[in-house]
Amino acid sequence: MATTDETQTDLVTVTIDGKSIKVPKGTLVIEAARQVGVMIPHFCYHPKLDPDANCRMCLVEIEKMPRLQTSCSTPVAEGMVVKSGSSEQVETARKSVLDFILANHPLDCPVCDQGGRCDLQDFSHEYTATVSRFSELKRVFQKEYFSPLIETQMNRCVQCLRCVRYCDQVMDVKALAPVGRGTLTEIKAFGAHELDCEFCGGCVQICPVGAITSRMSMYEFRPWMLKRTDSICGYCGDGCQLTYQTKNNDLIEVSSTYGSGRNNGDLCARGYFGYQVSEHPDRLKTPMIREGESFRTVTWEEALEHVGQSLLAIKQKHGPDAIAGLITGRCTNEDLYVFQKFMRGIIGTNQLDSSVRSGHLAGIKALQRVQGTPRWTVAFEDILEADVLMLVGTNVTETNPITGLKVKEAVKRRGARLITIEALEPAIGTISNISNLASYHFSVRADRIHEAVLGFMKSVMETHGVDQEIRGGAAGFGNDIFSRLSGMPWSKLEQMTGYETSRFAEAAAVFCQGKKVVVLVGQGVLRSPGGYGTTMNLLDLLLLTGKMPRPGCGVAPLAELNNDQGAFEMGAVGEALPGGVPIDHAETRQALTRAWERSIPATPGASFPEILGRMKAGTIKALLMVGENPLGSLPPSSGVEQAMQKLEFLVCQEAFRTETAGIAHVLLPVATAAEKDGTFINTEGHLQTVRKAVEPAGESRPDWEVFSALSVMMDDPMEYLDVRDIGKEIRNLLPGTRVLGPAPMPPKPDSQTVQAYMAGEYQRDVAVRYRLPEGPEPASDELVLVLTQSLFHSGKFSLKANGLIKVESAGRLYVNPQEAGRRGLGEGDRVALHNSQGSVEVTIGFRERIPSGMGVFPEHFDGEICRLFPYTVDPETKSLVWKSTVVRVEPVPVLPGSRK
Amino acid sequence: MPVYEPILLKNMEQPGYTGSLKDYEQAGGYQALRKVLKEYAPEAVIEAVKKSGLRGRGGAGFPTGVKWGFIPKDHPGPKYLCCNADESEPGTFKDRQLMERDPHQMLEGMLITCYAIGAETAYIYIRGEFRLGAKILWRAIDEAKAAGYVGDNVLGSGRTINVYVHQGAGAYICGEETALLESLEGKRGLPRFKPPFPATHGLYQKPTVVNNVETMANIPHIINRGWEWFASIGSPPKSTGTRVFCLSGHVKRPGNYEVPMGIPFRELIYEFGGGMRSEKPLKAFIPGGASAPFLTPEHLDVKMDFEALALAGSMLGSGGVTVMEEGTSMVWAALRLMEFFYHESCGKCTPCREGSSWLVQILQRIWHKRGQSGDIELMEELCRNIAGRTVCAFGEAEVGPVLSTIKHWRHEYESLIQESAVSGRGGRELPVLAL
């Protein structure tokens, strides 16, 4: 729900089939009809798309108009009288349109995946005679290979162009085009190649017939055989509603309906084609205990007994702080809550951490510090209604595709101005590029985003000064930051960012005029050294311009994982208790002690880098690993391998045998998102219900069940009947974690916290945040190498998704073609990358959107390249940061006779 | 043979007239533009054109001045003029001659129009096949620019008017004004649904006037000789001025003839066209391009103006008059035209797309003696279901030939279907399943 009031609009009265209704001026007749319960049949109309009025199915009779009108393109007028079902003329017209459409339709319904949920079938059933008078030859298209995931069957096409318009108007991808004329028009990929696009599946979902279908489950089902389960996607933080469709406990397909969820029915490749993870043959199906070099399959009883006894023994011998735990933000709130309760209440340690540490925490901590709440103060609706949007360090389409769609809609259809600061060049490619839509784009190197933000702030302050209102109350704050920014020479900022003062000034002017301003902060900031500081500065920017406490304005860090936000709010980090409050918060400690009937350890928590340190030092002997895989994801420079090997006891709760699971002492198979009930909190802070679509693979169980069972084995039972039982406990403790309905109600910034911040709290680290770095620039022949997220993957988990692997199965070092040309490299060439950490061989790929001097590698395939990255620990968030490094590039000599 | 004063073809009929700027100026060219810039407020130009009664020469015959009047006066952004030179209606070839032989005449008309509606940019959307015409127009624009008629400061008036030629890519539908605009914007040439009309949401969604070449060519004369003069020609008040009729088919002297509106077809065909080419009498004629329904010898005395033709059940359309002699099969003629419409149907909306393919297949069957009883009635019903239900006027156009030939020559269809029955070939030949 938007945080600002909706403006009132004029209402007009229309009568449709005798039913009168008042609707806002400009409403289309077809929509007004829907509101009075008159369904007007249509193919080409879709509320998400501009009307095209091409199918002619929605013709209606409107009094005082000479001929039938298309209700999908006619706006209502005061006193309009419309006849749809009550008009004989309309009935004839509908019959004839169906007659025409069916003329060339193959009627292969028995083998069509759309059969049973096809608009053409339904309307034929409702409106047309059963005998076709068409006795000519039907036109037949040659079958062509379309793509690995999407199939076209053009004989079935009714040429409504919904797919083409969706691809252009909603996705901004423009991968599809109608080719040919008249009845010979067919939908093809743009250009003479197979479809190469974002694979959002939108064309499949929006096709009213079976002309575009998914290849993932072709011919495997009839729609009426499918069981539908509404749930939430388990990949990124956008938290999209999706419906799992299953048959006999098999996942058949995923869909999302218009109007449902925060995504409004739109999905991305991960959501639409990435569901097969749960059914991967490599799934762990039984508990296993290590015996020498191999594992022995055991029963759950044996495994739990073994783990419980071992943990008890270690606790008795070395104390509770010899045990630590790590959990992934992919888990449900219930899993996360029970995990931290287990660690704190049963084991008795605060040494626990989760994946939120590796990025999103930087944003959460900044929000919490300035505005007193760890959640966004805006919602997706505010993005749609914003007049100025600012994207910092995020290629939003690739990391949070659905948030990206909100930005696209705001800019393309609602006229918002967009300012982007990101290491991207505006260039057209197969994946949409948000910087193409920007009014002002600052294409700065990945490690110069902080400086670009400083330049932008300096420009805002110099041209527009401090906001009148805050000047009185927090003059010191404003003046301090103003003077720090003034002290930065423009010459240096221009040199570091590559943009002139005037360019900053133009963008700053647009920013200052904005009434509803939302700043989205992405992984390019949050997962970089100093990302916390950059986020803080952006919050300062909104405060200084007077936008911050206003509804409709806010800073919005984008969560990478589906439940990163939940991980923090459930207290699955060392320094925070459930509710995200500090570990020493007396009131919460009391409440928890009472509710849990257990004491909360008083020792300060530890973050994962600290846990790693204690593992190396040998003080931590046992580690509970829930869905995390440090061996497979951290750079070797972090010393993770040595640390892990020192462990006496490593338990992995995993769905797959990852690198870390490979060295575990006990493996416990657990359920994936499609296999369990619970809740997730998405990036906007909206709590949504996750439902079990299929039974867990083999003997795997939800994570919370494992902890609950372990507690029994450890003679300190923490029993729950089901997830609802846990949910009840959470809700009693944390009133903010109720399922609120379809849209979140974002919290308001806490004015006391804001005032305290501006009154002096900001001074704690202001000097660090407003400082230009002193350090060597990379030499001109060196490449800044950055790990980024791909649109087609999410962490390493999605590598098990068959559909996504078909689109992207290996990593390449993506560089600008011109950059490659300068270095004499071609696409597909092998190169060696060297730096002080080591050297690695990679294959070159081209992407025009990458600035020169930079190379991008998808982090999902970083197993080898990871070696080149030194790591740092962010002092504020204590997260391990290893996002970028500098390398030298050398071509690998091609051996004579070997193919390039 | 009566003699009428040529207006549009006057210059080019002079021996030695090349259509160059020099020739045009010598013939009094660009005086109208000078006069307008000096003496007329933009509204006064629109008023004069309204009073002249000039109606669009492209086909629909919408009053030109009224169309200009729809352009919002206080619109802050740019406005555009598009000259529709995508002449592709079968049997129509007047615009081509007007462009190639006297390009400055239409250019002057366009400049006056730009002044009247406040447009700074004008495009000439020319049919792709008219390569020569495009070249001539570019040259004319260059000449006019050098002489100060086109450019940043037209004749020192402070007005900017730039004119560009855009060549189409060979689609009949791009002669439809909104498809033309789509194509001009670089998109696939498909008609837009209306409203909104181009007058408010035209090229790049800006107020736009789309006018035919012949319409534009008339403008300088209305200014030079006054709207009263123009309004007195033809058959006032609804059909004023002359029309360039394109006479083709089985006549002795086919060609372009400029005559005042309102003379009877008999005069055009028998006086100007010299009558039928052989002994065979006239059987049928198309009065206004392929989209206009066929007429019969009974209609030879119908006056060639908008109203009279509408009363006769056809339309003046683009001015292409195609004459057919006795012995011509009307089924064949309808089939030939339907093949054209089937080929050119853009495919955007269902009735036109599917209807044209369905109709052409039925006609083919009948012509190849595989008709079946009920075909005629089916075609009539299909036509009823196409006309009035499509995005653009193409739907009405494509059913014209079919319905009018059935109306006047139903027996020809019936006898072909009868023959099919006799020869035992009725219906589509279906493959026989081997059991």
Image (cartoon, grey):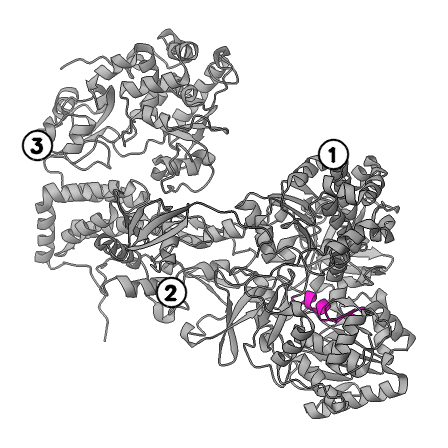
In percent of width and height, residue A470 lies at 75, 43
In percent of width and height, residue A686 lies at 62, 64
- Circles 2 and 1 on the same chain: yes
Disc 1 crowd, CA 10 A, few/some/many (<14, 14-19, 20+): some
In this view, the mark in front (3 or 2): 2
Q: What element carries label 2?
A: loop
Disc 3 crowd, CA 10 A, few/some/many (<14, 14-19, 20+): few
Image quadrant in which you'd find residue B114: top left
Residue named by callout 1: A463
Which mark is drawn over residue A541?
Answer: none
Residue named by callout 3: B298
Q: Which residue is drawn at 24% across and 28% down?
A: B319
Q: Is mark 1 on a helix, strand or loop?
A: helix
Q: Which amino acid does label 3 sit on?
A: Glu
Mark 1 chain: A
In percent of width and height, residue A107 lies at 32, 65
- Which residues are the magenta region? A562-579
Q: Nearer the viewer, residue B97 or A110?
A: A110
Q: Distance between the residues labelled 1 and 3?
A: 81 Å
Asked whether A563 falls inside the magenta stretch, the response is yes
The furthest residue to the top: B26
Residue named by callout 2: A118
Mark 3 chain: B
Q: Is mark 3 on a helix, strand or loop?
A: helix
